[in-house]
Amino acid sequence: EKQYVLGLRLSSTHLGLQMGYARLKDRQGRLDDAIKLYQEAAKAHPQEAAVFNDMGLCQARSGKLTDAVVSLEEPCD
């Protein structure tokens, strides 16, 4: 976790770091933190379907089904 934080301080919109950190939070069960990180990644990389896919799956696991559908449909627009 410390390495992700340090890396993001150097490059706050680095896709690999953003996604890795969000996935870490997701695996730790810290779904709200993960969703916030996915949202930041989505703002920085609106054309990256993987961001919306992972965010949607995380939102679904947290019970935010409406948000999950919106996220999962986003790359289709």
Image (cartoon, rainbow, N blue to C red):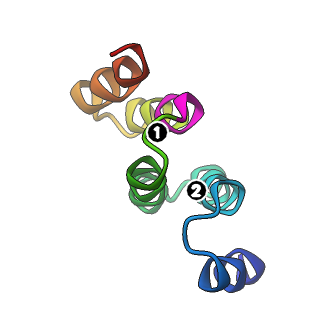
- 34 magenta-colored: no
Instruction: Indicate the position of residue 77 as horizontal and vertical percent values.
Output: 33, 16
- Above or below, 58 against 10 in this view is above
| Residue at 60% in and 60% down | 18
- 51 magenta-colored: yes
Q: What is the span of residues highlighted in magenta in the rendered image?
A: 48-53
SS for callout 2: helix
Q: In front here: 7 or 46? A: 46
Instruction: Indicate the position of residue 2 as horizontal and vertical percent values.
Output: 72, 84
Instruction: Indicate the position of residue 49 as horizontal and vertical percent values.
Output: 53, 28
Q: Distance between the residues labelled 2 and 1?
A: 9 Å
| Residue at 35% in and 17% down | 73
- Above or below, 52 against 45 in this view is above
Instruction: Indicate the position of residue 46 as horizontal and vertical percent values.
Output: 42, 41
Q: Which amino acid does label 1 sit on?
A: Met
Q: In which quarter of the image is residue 62?
A: top left
Q: Which residue lies furthest to the right in this view?
A: 3
Q: In front here: 45 or 7? A: 45
Q: First in sequence: mark 2 or mark 1? A: 2
| Residue at 64% in and 63% down | 14
Left or right? Give the position of 40 relative to 7: left
- Above or below, 61 against 9 in this view is above
Q: In front here: 69 or 7? A: 7
Residue topped by disc 2? 22
Q: Residue 42 carries which label?
A: none
Q: Are marks 2 and 1 in contact (CB under 8 Å)?
A: yes
Q: Count residues near mark 1 (Cα–Cα under 10 Å), then give few for <14, some for 14-19, many for 20+.
A: many
Q: What residue type is labelled 2?
A: Ala
Residue topped by disc 1? 55
- Above or below, 32 against 68 in this view is below
Q: Count residues near mark 2 (Cα–Cα under 10 Å), then give few for <14, some for 14-19, many for 20+.
A: many
Prevalent SS, magenta region: helix
